Amino acid sequence: MKILVCIKQVPDMESKFKVNADGRWYDAADLAWRMNEYDEYAVEQAVQLKEQVGADSDLTVLCIGPERVKETMKKALAMGADRGVNVADDNSHQKDPFEIASIIAEFAKEQGFDLIFTGMQSQDRGSAQVGVLVAELLGLPSISTIVDFSYADGRISAKRELEGGVKARVSCATPALVTCQLGLNTPRYPTLPNIMKAKKKELLSVELAELLKVEGKQETSKIYFPEKKGGGLVLEGDASDLADQLIQILKEKTAVLA
Amino acid sequence: MKTLLVAEYRDGKLLGSTYELVAFAQKIGAESSMFLVGSETVLPQYDGTLYLADSSKYGEFNPAVHKQLLLDVIAREQPEMVVFSHSSYGWDLAPRISLALNAAHISEVVEFVDGVPVAPVCNAKLRREVKANTVQTVVSLQAGAFGLSSDPVGSPRVERVETDTAPQIEFEGYEEAEAGGVDLSKAEVIVSAGRGIGKPENIAMIEALAKSLGGEYAASRPVVDSEWAEHNRQVGTTGQTVSPKLYVACGISGAIQHLAGMKKSEFVVAINTDKDAPIGEVADVLLVADLKQLVPVLTEKLQIL
Ligand SMILES: Cc1cc2nc3c(=O)[nH]c(=O)nc-3n(C[C@H](O)[C@H](O)[C@H](O)COP(=O)(O)OP(=O)(O)OC[C@H]3O[C@@H](n4cnc5c(N)ncnc54)[C@H](O)[C@@H]3O)c2cc1C
Ligand SMILES: Nc1ncnc2c1ncn2[C@@H]1O[C@H](COP(=O)(O)O)[C@@H](O)[C@H]1O
């Protein structure tokens, strides 16, 4: 069984963000980078499927982005992927979901993947489009936002998460694509021996020009910080003082301490 | 401008988000018509054309088939904008439609500024304006961003639509959220634990603070996903919606899906080490502090009040 998992590298969301010089994206300097949280679930599910299928399986992890994304790809290799393919692109942040999906589909189209895993959305741009678009471009069925997954005899069964905690049970034949939601599984931590083993795994680079055949349909024209509204009080200081101040505020503004 | 609104129907009911789409069209001053895979027995209160496909025939979740039904309607109506809710139905169907139309799809739109859609970036810490390079566009709207249409009225002119497209996916039924446990909607005070609590043992600290305030404890999704708290304590779009007198968010960043479940709280206190965390936007008081230090001290002081 041939499996593909698509991952994105994103900044740690607790970073202090700055707008970059052209005002159209966040500044990439001084950020800590990690694997998109949703994609960690995708990698874990792909590795579990590989383990289930056994010797006959082959798992590729794909990431479009600049040189630094290889660090994140190594984590996927240490989690159990067999090889990494980096589509080298210093300007991936300017590509729209359609361009990203087209690059992935172009890479995948003649390789006969039985299953493709993506995250349901990326944490930075969060379009929640790329996975479904890849499937449509390849003419495959896709199931989005899954919180449960199983595979047997050429069919997948999954649960889609809907609003309010309701789930929909769905199934389809492979080849297919699924987009992974938070809580799908418990992503493993790479062990030291697996991190060492991962260093020997193949990590290929592919030129963007080989795979990019389309033009984008949208662009970010401006990025900015939202206005702080509501005028809430921001308090800093020593824990004991803060506790006293808060109790005073709760007494004045709410009825909960009455 | 001509818009086509894609309404939603689930488990025999028309979803309330339908009226958010109507409100959106009103707000941007657009003409609209509506598409729904639903039933004639529960029509929206809507003064316009409704293209209706029968869900007993085409299913409530059936992407390939709904896609074809919708594309046929788009071909007839020629809308400049196709409008979805950014929901489990919308984010599944919208990309399929945008690709087939070769149209830009802008997701999670939270507002329109001078006709330009705006979407959140990085967990809503930033916003971006998005420019479409196509004439026809697809947008999906963040839940709650455009309000509800004031007093929905009217009955739609119904036009039936049919297709013989084959499904690709089999829908086997719904599974309800497990019932029972705590009813957070009745709690007057809720103290909520986020990933910032760091480890499962620290739930006890949150629970103690909740007790000292005479309330219940709750949690954000990662805390529930890690099984540090039960699902019936989760607040947010895929958990419960709460509106207590006091909501104390401890180590919660304030993602849109979390805010959707608690922003109707009367008074919001946030404890967070990150001064810029988006929870600050809804907090009446943001205490910039390590919850592991502040929460025990606060609990102790409350206990001796
Ligand atoms: C379709 C969908 C549905 C979703 N439904 C829900 C839902 O129902 N409910 C929900 O909550 N989420 C939901 N989410 C997930 C949501 O997008 C966020 O990922 C989630 O809310 C983040 O939880 P958090 O704030 O606890 O964690 P994080 O975003 O990781 O934030 C942790 C916060 O803790 C702070 N912190 C860290 N250490 C400390 C410390 N020592 N003291 C004080 N502060 C500290 C950090 O500064 C940070 O702000 C959903 C997502 C999707 C896509
Ligand atoms: N640059 C990228 N490289 C590889 N996969 C990506 C990239 N961007 C997005 N994806 C995949 O598409 C999913 C959805 O992303 P998005 O549509 O941007 O929210 C992510 O969770 C990834 O699995």
Image (cartoon, rainbow, N blue to C red):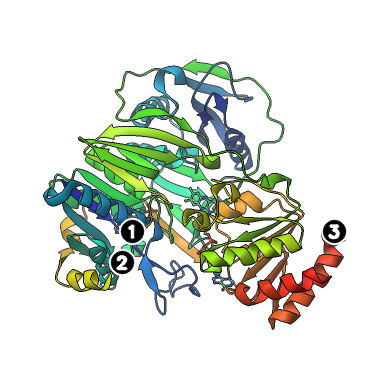
Amino acid of disc 2: Asn
Question: Which is more toward the observer, B51 or A74?
Answer: A74
Residue sitting at x 52%, y 19%: B39
Q: Secondary structure at mark 3?
A: loop
Q: Secondary structure at mark 2?
A: loop
Which residue is denoted by mark 2 in the rendering?
A91
Query: Which chain is mark 3 on?
Result: A
Say whether disc 2 or disc 3 marks the residue closer to the N-terminus.
2
The answer for how far apart the CA atoms under marks 1 and 3 are is: 51 Å
Q: Residues within 10 Å of mark 2 (few under 14, many from 20)?
A: few
Which residue is denoted by mark 1 in the rendering?
A95
- How far from the left and from the top, in percent, is residue B36? 49, 26
Query: Which chain is mark 1 on?
Result: A
| Contact, mark 2 vs mark 1 (Cβ under 8 Å) | yes
- How far from the left and from the top, in percent, is residue B263? 67, 53
Residue sitting at x 39%, y 17%: B162
The answer for how far apart the CA atoms under marks 2 and 3 are is: 53 Å
**In the displayed structure, would residue A175 be above or below residue B268?**
above
Q: Are marks 2 and 3 on the same chain?
A: yes
Residue sitting at x 83%, y 60%: A254
Which residue is denoted by mark 3 in the rendering?
A255
Amino acid of disc 1: Lys
Amino acid of disc 3: Ala
Q: Are marks 1 and 3 on the same chain?
A: yes
Q: Residues within 10 Å of mark 3 (few under 14, many from 20)?
A: few
- How far from the left and from the top, in percent, is residue A91? 31, 66
